[in-house]
Image (cartoon, rainbow, N blue to C red):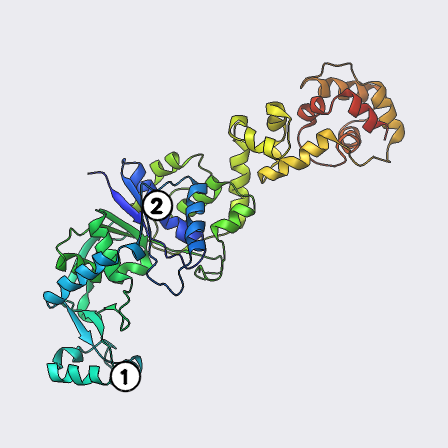
Amino acid sequence: MPPVVRFAPSPTGYIHIGNIRTALLNWCVAKRADGRFILRYDDTDTARSRQEYADAIAVDLAWLGMVPDVQARQSERMALYDAAAARLREAGRLYPCYETEEELERRRTLQKARGLPPVYDRAALRLTAEQKAALEAEGRRPHWRFLLNHRIVEWQDGVRGPAHVDTVSLSDPVLIRADGGYLYTLPSVVDDIDLGVTHIIRGEDHVTNTAVQIEIFEALGGTVPAFAHHNLLTTVSGEGLSKRSGALSIGSLREAGFEPMAVASLAVLTGTAEAVRPIASLQELAALVDLSRISRAPARFDPAEIETLNAKLLHETAFADVSQRLTALGIEGGEDFWLAVRSNLVRLADAKLWWEVVTGPVAASERDREFLGRAAGLLPSEPWDENTWGAWTQAVKEATGAKGKALFMPLRQALTGLDHGPELKALLPLIGREQALARLAG
C-alpha cells in the first residue's frame, strides 16, 4: 500500500529548519511512492497554541512546495480522544492517580538516594475506593496514567535498524492531566489510527516514546505503523534548535532571500550519506531520500552553507523559472540579462544591482581619462553581440599597447562603476553604445 505519513507540529511558535527536516523527509517518503502527506496541528495545548503560528506553518510548507493531502486539528477531534480514553479505562489500562507534583518529586528524590531508578511506583493502583473518595473529597482531581505491560518492546527502525525499549525502565506515562486536558501521547496515537498513518518518521528524541506508543496502539486495537527516527539538526556549536528562540526559522530564511530548494536541499541532505548539493526540485530530492542512509550522529547545520547552495542553485536556474520574479523586481532585461548575471548572484535580489549597472547611472571614473578617450573612439558601431567586447578590446590593445589588467580594469570601472562583476562580453550589449560612450566620457 502507498505510505501515509504525517507532519504534526504544535502551533506554539515558528517552525525552524529542524522541524522542516522532519516534514520534508515525510513528504519525500510519501510522494515518491504516490502516498499521502497529512498536516496535523497538535494544538491541544490551548495556553500556548496560536492561530498565527498555524497560519505561518501553512505558509512555510507552501513556500517549500509541500501541499498537504489532508489537514487535521487535534482541537477539533476531542470526541475521538474521549472515546479512546473510555476504552482504556474499561480495559484497566488507564488508571487514576492523585499525587501532587511535589509528592512525586519527593518520591523520585528518595528513590535516587536509595540507588533506585526514579520510576513511578504505581502506588495509585493500591488505593481503595474509599481512599480515592477521601482524596477527591479533599479537592484532589486525578491525573490518568497508562498501565504499561512491562516488557521489551521491539521494532525495526527505518533509520536505526533493530530497536527495543524495556518498558520496565519507564514510568507509566500520564495521558490525561488533572484538569482533564490531554498530553501529546494519546491524541497522537488515536489520530494515527483514525487517519491510517502507516509510517511515523520523526526525530530521534522520540525513540523512548515509541515503546509507549506501540503499547497504546496495541491496547486500542490499531495497526502499529513503521517507525523511523532520524538524527537531529543542531547549530554549528552543537546546540539544539528551538521554536521559542526563533533561530533559523523558515520565515526568517525566506525573508533573507534564500531559494526554497536551497533550504530544502540542505535540510534533507545534511547528516546523510548523500553529498550536500543543490537539488532543483522536491521530486528529485524525494528520489534521493533513503532513510537507512541517514547518519546516527547529530547533523550540524551551518547557515553559511545556504549561501553557497543558494548561489549554485541560481547559477543553474533557467530564465523561464525566474522571469516573473525578475519582473516583480523591476528588471526588464529578459533572458540575455539573466544569462549574463546569474553566475554572479548569491540571492535573486542581487540581480537588481546588476540591472542598475546596466541601466545606470554609475559612478564616473576619474582615472585613465586619456586611455578611456582613445577607447571610446574605437567603439564599434551597433548592433552588438557577445563578440563585440573581444573585438573592441583587441583594437584598444593594439592602439594603446595596454594589456591584461591595465587594459581591462579601467574599461570595467568606467562602464560599470565596479572592479568586479559579470563578464563584459555579455554585459556590454545590454549597456549599449550610447551609454557606453557616455560612461567612457565620465
Can residue 162 be spotted in the picture? no
Give the residue displayed 62% in from the left and 23% down from the top.
Answer: 336
The residue lying toward the viewer, choosing from 245 and 90, is 90
The earlier-in-sequence mark between 2 and 1 is 2
Mark seen at residue 187? none
Rendered location of residue 217, percent (x, y): 17, 57
Q: CA gap, disc 2 to disc 1?
A: 42 Å
Mark seen at residue 103? 1
146 with respect to 349 (left or right): left
Mark seen at residue 25? 2
Mark 2 packing: few (<14 Cα in 10 Å), some, or many (20+)? many
Amino acid type of the residue that numbered disc 2 sits on in the rendered structure: Leu
Rendered location of residue 254, percent (x, y): 52, 46
Relative to 259, residue 380 above or below? above
Task: Report helix, strand or loop for mark 2.
Answer: helix
The residue lying toward the viewer, choosing from 316 and 193, is 193
Give the residue displayed 23% in from the left and 38% down from the top.
Answer: 2
Residue sticking out furthest to the right? 370
200 with respect to 439 (left or right): left
Q: Quadrant of residue 357?
A: top right
Task: Report helix, strand or loop for mark 1.
Answer: helix
Relative to 333, residue 146 above or below? below
